[in-house]
Amino acid sequence: MSVVPVGSVPAALDSLEPACICPACGCSQATAFVRIPNAAVNCNELFRTRDTALRAPQAPIELAYCCTCRHVFNSAFDAGMISYTTAYENSLHFSPRFQQYACDLVKYLANAYELKDRSVIEVGCGKGEFLRMLVESTHARGIGFDPSVPDTELSESYISFIQDYYSEKYSEFRCRLLCCRHVLEHIAAPVPFLRMLRSALEPDGALFCEVPNGTLSITARGMWDVIYPHISYFTLASLRATFRQAGFEVVRSQVAFGDQYLWVEAVPVSEPIHPTRDAAEDSIPEPIETFRATYDSTIAHWRGRISEWTRQNARIVVWGAGAKGVTFLNAVSDAGRVHAVIDANPRKWDTFTPVSGVAVIPPDKLRSNPPDVMLLMNAVYESEIRDQLAAMSIAPRVIESVM
């Protein structure tokens, strides 16, 4: 099943007329530049049967650009369509490469902040892996908020997990460090959300926030990260602007994890700083102007490659059942052309990808039916995947990174 057939992604507005309000800075002159008609709404939800996966909800994405703060966002986003439950699964901690990145980040935060016997809050903690690492490393007290936390993990020594969204009703909690990783891009109103988080900080408190790199997402390399659950695609400029408007000063920022992530550390200031338009930045950046052509040509390229391999009766397998894999499959592969999706996360095994309905299987199942073509959804994991294939004596004719 192809969500976006080649050539059918219409430019939203040929004249690029102002269309919507920017959620990052409030500017009313944001401009729509492309529309993707059908995207999987819950691309990290697990589906236990192929039938339910094929009937997974879809919705349009309409990307818009704000010249004031250089923010990219989905102006067609409807928060009411999204739900995060224990069925939501996006943990990357089963990858040695990602686990090392998380360990390095924990070491950095432990060195930057004295957290022993202090409180750390993580908003959007997922299954709690990162918070556990941080608490164990610093001897802090941890509080994690996430509706997808399993019922079996709600009470641990030195950590309290709350199976809920963070909101004002938890205002009694205060912390030295608040972590918010891969959450802000899901929030329809990020400035009020950050102001709410600001109130949770102790007088010497700081906020650490990590998001996908929106600048990368509007290129051929990163376009598989354009997904419905993300209303925002932050650039460093728009991330700083959002924090300033929420009453923070960004004290450090960095591009990380193979240029795929952005993070900032911020501390409260007494007065918010409102972004202003810079006349020198009024022109639309080239990636915005060319995104439709980039999107179409990239999809055409991969559909052509998959069609050719199919004519050769090749067994095609994708490695990576996360958001990138779901987006790729729905955009470029007709039903049956990709035989399976491999993922290191055991919680995804024996499930099916939303909309495309491709089976997710563990790596060791490749032993009994080796692939001819292996497509890797994220180049940052290529070395460890090649090592796993070599350890299983599996040598696909083609191993190629999609991103």
Image (cartoon, helix red, strand yellow):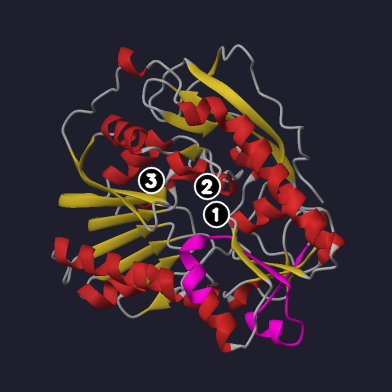
Label 2 neighbourhood size at 10 Å, few (<14), some (14-19), many (20+)? many
Left/right of residue 183 with respect to residue 275 in the rendered view: right
Label 1 neighbourhood size at 10 Å, few (<14), some (14-19), many (20+)? some
Residue 273, image x and y in percent? 23, 26
> What amino acid type should be assigned to the residue bearing mark 2?
Gly
Please count the marks in the image: 3
Residue 87, image x and y in percent? 63, 64
Give residue 168's mark: 3
Left/right of residue 93 with respect to residue 328 in the rendered view: left
Q: Would residue 62 be visible to someone looking at this image?
A: no
Q: Nearer the viewer, residue 73 or 140?
A: 73
Distance Cα–Cα, label 2 vs label 3: 35 Å
Distance Cα–Cα, label 1 vs label 2: 6 Å
Using the image, determine if residue 385 lies above or below residue 217.
below
The span picked out in magenta is 358-385
Q: Would residue 18 be visible to someone looking at this image?
A: yes
- Disc 3 on helix, strand or loop? helix
Q: Nearer the viewer, residue 300 or 279?
A: 300
Q: Which residue is label 2 attached to? A: 222
Residue 153, image x and y in percent? 47, 76
In reply to whether residue 212 is colored magenta, the answer given is no
In reply to whether residue 361 is colored magenta, the answer given is yes
Distance Cα–Cα, label 3 vs label 1: 39 Å
Q: Which residue is label 1 attached to? A: 403
Which residue is at a point 49% across and 31% down the rendered structure image? 287
Name the N-terminal-most of marks 1 and 2.
2
Which residue is at a point 84% across and 65% down the rendered structure image? 312
- Disc 2 on helix, strand or loop? loop
For the residues labelled 1 and 2, say whether their Cβ atoms are less than 8 Å apart.
yes
Using the image, determine if residue 13 lies above or below residue 185.
above
Left/right of residue 206 with respect to residue 337 in the rendered view: left
